[in-house]
């Protein structure tokens, strides 16, 4: 029976994590992004698997995954931490590395290059000291090998739904202290706990007393989602578009097409031609018998773009 359950879990994981095709229109400059990354940065990923689509729906965000950038092997100063990373990663020592928690694989070391074809964003903890960045990385490294907590994702889905057959708190692991297996985690929870160890805020609760004093309270790390690092005012959002347009007016020189507009990256929007009823022509007289002849009203078919220009000219 246990073997059957293990087989079913494997097949379900394989189906959920199967990746879709990469986008034909890249949104970020991967090389520039990789050059600008710093140790301790959070990397947000717009995933393409079935489970990624579920997470996007649950969290109402484009970001389905988060990872922690730790640099290259020789960037890790602590020899004990470096030996742990080497134990879990035997690739090129010059490769840029991230720590992430993946369904079916657990908490692992991955090369940054694995996400070359994805839409990515850097969330940089503003003002994080180098020593605290090492502390965040150290916490994450110590959790390498932990399994992925699928139960937490299911409970998080129920928590985000506007309604549920069961109360959100009933039999939910999200609101229990040290709930479930202590050697399981998910990507955002791991990172939230890591930053919490150095008291770096993500989305804290803030209490203002009557005397004007302020106290910060840490949020339950099991309630974090990838989008929270994007939303946090304590993280700087860094984007490197495929074509940079930092110079004033440079966007006018982008290679825009004047022919089509698109519903999504693969399907063009082809509107039906518009029929514009023109006003009737004045009545004229037949040369032979002076019989009045009304010229027929004409219906002209124009495209939406020309029609738009016509309205613009009329408004001038």
Image (cartoon, rainbow, N blue to C red):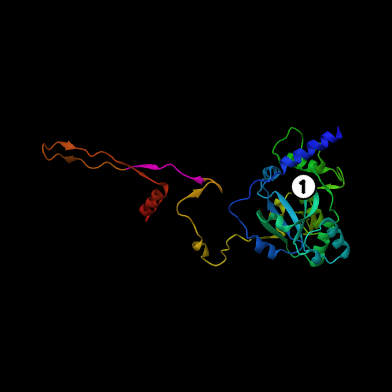
Residues in magenta?
A: 268-277
In terms of secondary structure, where does tag 1 sit? helix
Task: Answer yes or no: is residue 189 visible.
Answer: yes
Instruction: Left or right? Give the position of 278 relative to 287.
Output: right
Instruction: Left or right? Give the position of 279 relative to 1.
Output: left
**Residue drawn 29% across and 42% down?**
279
Determine if the magenta segment contains residue 274.
Answer: yes
Tell me if residue 231 comes above or below residue 93 in the rendering: above
Q: Hey, which quadrant is residue 164 in on the image?
A: top right
Residue 53 in the image: state x and y as whole percent: 67, 44
**Residue drawn 65% across and 45% down?**
20
* 224 or 252, nearer to the observer: 252
* 2 or 272, nearer to the observer: 2
Dominant secondary structure of the magenta stretch? strand
Residue 114 in the image: state x and y as whole percent: 71, 55
**Residue drawn 80% across and 41% down?**
151
Task: Answer yes or no: is residue 197 visible.
Answer: no
């Amino acid at each position: 029976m246990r073997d059957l359950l293990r087989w079913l879990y494997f097949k379900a994981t394989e189906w959920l994590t199967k990746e879709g095709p990469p986008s034909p229109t890249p949104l970020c400059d991967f090389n520039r992004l990789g050059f600008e990354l710093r140790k301790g940065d959070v990397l947000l990923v717009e995933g393409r698997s079935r489970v990624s689509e579920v997470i996007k729906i649950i969290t109402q965000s484009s970001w389905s995954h988060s990872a922690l950038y730790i640099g290259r092997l020789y960037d890790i100063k602590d020899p004990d931490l470096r030996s742990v990373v080497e134990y879990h990663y035997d690739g090129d020592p010059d490769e840029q590395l991230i720590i992430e928690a993946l369904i079916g694989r657990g908490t692992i070391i991955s090369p940054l290059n694995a996400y070359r074809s994805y839409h990515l964003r850097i969330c940089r903890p503003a003002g994080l000291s180098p020593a605290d960045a090492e502390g965040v990385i150290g916490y994450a490294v110590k959790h390498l090998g932990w399994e992925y907590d699928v139960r937490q994702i299911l409970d998080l889905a129920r928590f985000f739904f506007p309604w549920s057959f069961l109360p959100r708190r009933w039999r939910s692991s999200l609101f229990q202290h040290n709930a479930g297996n202590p050697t399981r985690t998910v990507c955002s929870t791991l990172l939230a706990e890591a930053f919490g160890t150095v008291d770096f805020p993500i989305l804290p609760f803030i209490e203002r007393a009557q005397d004007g004093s302020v106290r910060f309270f840490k949020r339950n790390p099991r309630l974090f989602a990838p989008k929270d690092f994007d939303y946090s005012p304590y993280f700087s959002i860094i984007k490197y578009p495929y074509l940079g347009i930092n110079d004033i007016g440079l966007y006018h020189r982008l290679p825009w097409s004047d022919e089509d507009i698109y519903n999504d990256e693969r399907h063009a929007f082809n509107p039906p031609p518009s029929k514009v009823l023109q006003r009737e022509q004045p009545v004229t007289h037949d040369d032979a018998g002076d019989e009045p002849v009304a010229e027929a009203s004409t219906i002209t078919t124009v495209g939406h773009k020309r029609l738009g220009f016509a309205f613009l000219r009329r408004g001038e």
